[in-house]
Amino acid sequence: MSEPGATSPKTAEEPVSAKDKLVDGLYGLGWGGVKLLPEPVAAGLGRLIADRVWKRRGKSVLRLESNLARVVPDASQARLAALSKAGMRSYMRYWMESFRLPTWKPERIAADVRIRDGHRITEALASGQGVVLALPHMGNWDLAGVWVTSHLGHPFTTVAERLKPETLYDRFVAYRESLGMEVLPHTGGSAFGTLARRLRAGGLVCLVADRDLSASGVEVKFFGESARMPAGPAILAQQTGALLLPVTLWYDGPKVMSGRVHPPVDVPGTGTRSEKTSEMTQALADAFASGIAEHPEDWHMLQRLWLADLETRPEGQE
């Protein structure tokens, strides 16, 4: 599962800036300090931070609001503002939960995470078939991963992009490995082969798959406009025979996170590999859109996504 704000890997010679050290220190403080707070205090802190960030109307908040305008095209400015405020609270809830997640017991995961149609995962794995779970940036994808490892009792493999600074990337890898995930680096060229081997052996792979800015991204229609999404989930399903399942997540009250395992995306019977990949990725986009439209405030897309926005951005800007 990837993270927003990923960058290319830092070389050994590249110095670590003061800003990078500050970012890494703040995340370290979050993991070390937030989990020690009483839960109501941590939740309140998350809402306070979210509201202050939202009130400042910075680039991330304005981008979230712009993205939500595509999801809810008939919304008034007041409705969009309310959605973006709820969206920032949802996003900060993700972080507060993630900082505290290593302390959660399996009983709590079982009680507070409610996934509809999870049988689609368990039945495929029981039959020996590999499974690819593809998710958008909704709800808390790390919490969903812990539900898989603790409630379903099944390990899985995911991919993480390199974060800046490198020490922060190392923190994320260590954190996710502590939750029972196998984490592969996005760069280096070996991740795809490892994922394919895991799937051929009947394993489980989880990938966040609603944004791809690389040259290999597949163009799809998403809420009526062109965007690019990763080809990897569709290609893995084609090459390994794995079942490709879209999953959407949302918060359902102050404690519960709900989710849905959508019907499988089948490999088309005819067409070239490129044509099959395009058709399957479009089916993923459609499943993501259905879940996002129902719970737009829980879609944490604070970056440019649609091609129209990417074409108009200033050079060098996210």
Image (cartoon, grey):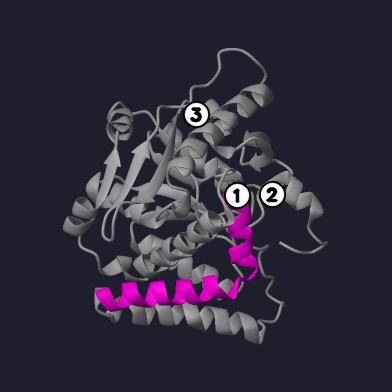
Viewer-proximal residue among 71 and 246: 71
Q: Which residue is mark 2?
A: 213
How many numbered badges does the structure rendering display? 3
- Helix, strand or loop for disc 2: loop
Quarter location, residue 90: bottom left
Q: Earlier in the sequence, mark 3 or mark 1?
A: 1
Instruction: Please determine whether, in this image, residue 299 is positioned above or below residue 36.
Output: above
Q: Is residue 296 left or right of residue 43?
A: right
**Three-letter code for the amino acid on which mark 1 is drawn:** Ala
Residue 166: quadrant of the picture: bottom right
**Which callout, 1 or 2, points at the residue further toward the start of the chain?**
1
Judged by its main secondary structure, the magenta piece is: helix
Identify the residue at horizontal 50%, vertical 42% (top origin): 195
Where residue 28 appears, as percent x and y from the top left, is: 45, 79
Magenta stretch in the rendered image: 40-69
Residues 138 and 290: in front is 290
